[in-house]
Amino acid sequence: MTSTELPMCPAPSEAPRRMPVRGAGRRPAFATGTNLTLGSGPLARILALAALAVLAAAWLLPLLWALLTSFKSEKDASDAAHWVWPGGGFTLEGFRTVVERGDLPLWMFNSLLISTAVTLVTVLVSAMAGYAFSRTLFTGRRWLFALTVAAILVPQQVLIVPWFQQMLTLGLIDTYAAVILPQTVMPMMVFILKKHFDTLPRELEEAARIDGAGHWRIFRSVMLPLSRPMLAAVAIFVFITAWNNFLWPFVSTSDPSLMTLPVGITSVKDAYGIQYAQTMSSAVLAALPLVIVFMLFQRHIVKSVATTGLGGQ
Amino acid sequence: MSAPPAAPRPSAATAVRRFLSPGLLFALPFLALFGVFMVWPLVQGLWMSLTDRSLSAHVPSFVGLGNYAEALGDGEMWRAVWHTVLFTLISTVPLVLVALVMALLVHTGLPGQWVWRLAFFAPYLLPVGVVSLLWTWLYQPDLGLYNHVLSAVGLDGVPWLSNESVALWAIALATLWWTVGFNFLLYLAALQSIPDHLYEAAAIDGAGAWRRLASITLPGLGRITGVVTVLQVLASLKVFDQVYLLTKGGPNGASRPVIEYVYDVGFTGYRLGYASAISYVFFALVVVASVAQLTAFRRREK
């Protein structure tokens, strides 16, 4: 999946060790006791640790319990007496049924295809626009950029009715194009990339220009290579947003063979309502890709979410 | 498509730019998509909201502000608006406060950093479909985790998703679990940027833990709290996915937010014109909330 693009993103050159969430370097600071926000005495430490443990348990238990259920037989899953440990031992039955049914891999494929297409188009188009707004002059530039910034306020939810009408008119309902195209318009990414290009040094660009390079050469050979960490951050963010998008893929597809993972997975419950073990097996399998990718690229993903800012369902 | 040369602007005087129209060409792919899939649909939606049209019959009739007048007197719409506002209140407050507490605790440098970060952030990575399957199971009245826990401590089980006065709160709780990790990360990043020397100075002056929290940490987080709150309010106003998937807006529409009403009217009731009008009512709500927050935020910054 993202393995095609993620490994290419180099370790960010700007002080990767200062990544907020790495927590590296906290210990020495703690030893001096100066930046302890909640107190440095042993009692404070124990209280803080207890509070953390309770919170972490509240956040992790639902996941662990679902995982446990996914390895139960249907009989044990729907037996209140065995709500923690299965009576008949663990089994892969739920997973086997889900995989044999075959729609989950199809939904993953659709999600992968759609999210990759959205990411490629959005990043390319936004980077070019960001470059244009940052480094070139053309009539209407300020006005168009102001319009783009204003459009950040427009929620996708307002647009689903006209989008649907539009796709109906264009005859695109139930096609990949209908799911992909509207998602590629992300004014926020243009804004972020424009601000980023504003910070790049002008000297390199001017040197290239003296050497006779045109805008396209400068963009490709100077700007893009200098922007790899930023482009990676934007790409990861766009990919995750597209991967998790529900409303528009839900509205624009009714053909089960075109459904994305978030949309398709919900039909599992309706079809197999009472089969809790199977349902949890589906959920576990559906969660797996992003969890694996996160494990592998934790630092980049967290950085991406933090630098691109706007998230949250 | 060659644009006439723009008059040199004083602000751009530093750079000599000879290529004028290539700039427009660079922006063109984005502008084309932007025009077709954002600007045009916005205009189209506004026009649709002034017509009466269904999905089937292709002859829309112009009704002026008729749809808006109907919306004003539509009790179901106001109920949905209220649910949206209520959900925004009961989700934003804990989503900001719990994230702050999590970040403060993790920031104290206790051992097990990666476990805490993973625990709080992992749910944020789950697609909404998975989250709703999981919480349907957790909230299951007879078999679900939470009712088992409640009965273990001697309390009665709660009909989480099937009781009209509980459903929206249950959805807000699931949302807290799911998305708090994002705010937690923003707070954690902000905490790291408070300079250590402030704490050192305070320690030398003999300030205790509470004093440092009240005089350094919390004021230092004022800005990020503004950002987190603004983002969270906007995100909560747009709630649809988890509500639709957990309760379908029920029981009896008791948890249905505006976006779901738009969906029901437009795609189940086939009244695209009326659905557009309600979309614009929602849009107005979002704009008012954004402007109000940004104004308050800016005033406090001064």
Image: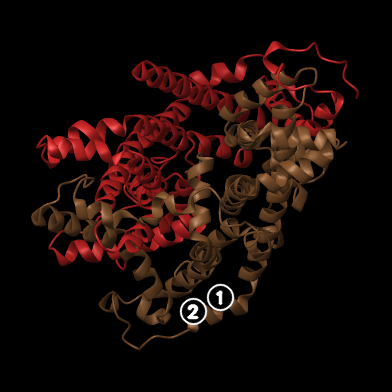
Chain colours: A brown, B red
Q: Residue at x 61, y 47 (%)?
A: A238
Picture quadrant of residue A197 = top right
Q: Secondary structure at mark 2?
A: helix
Q: Are marks 2 and 1 on the same chain?
A: yes
Q: Residue at x 23, y 61 (%)?
A: A53
Q: Residues within 10 Å of mark 1 (few under 14, many from 20)?
A: some
Please tell me the numbered disc located at residue A98: 1
Of residues B234 and B264, the one drawn nearer to the viewer in this rendering: B234
Distance CA(mark 2)–CA(mark 1): 6 Å
Q: Which image quarter holds the N terminus of chain A? A: bottom right
Q: Position of residue B162 (x, y in %)?
A: 35, 51
Q: Position of residue B117 (x, y in %)?
A: 36, 57
Q: Amino acid at mark 2?
A: Gly
Of residues A39 and B266, the one drawn nearer to the viewer in this rendering: A39
Of residues B141 and B300, the one drawn nearer to the viewer in this rendering: B300
Judged left or right of residue A12, residue B237 is left
Judged left or right of residue A272, residue B52 is right
Q: Residues within 10 Å of mark 2 (few under 14, many from 20)?
A: many
Q: Amino acid at mark 1?
A: Val
Q: Position of residue A201 (x, y in %)?
A: 65, 34
**Marks 1 and 2: in contact by CB < 8 Å?**
yes
Q: Secondary structure at mark 1?
A: helix
Say which chain tag 2 marks. A
Q: Position of residue B239 (x, y in %)?
A: 47, 40
Q: Which residue is mark 2?
A: A94
Rendered view: A9 above or below A101:
above
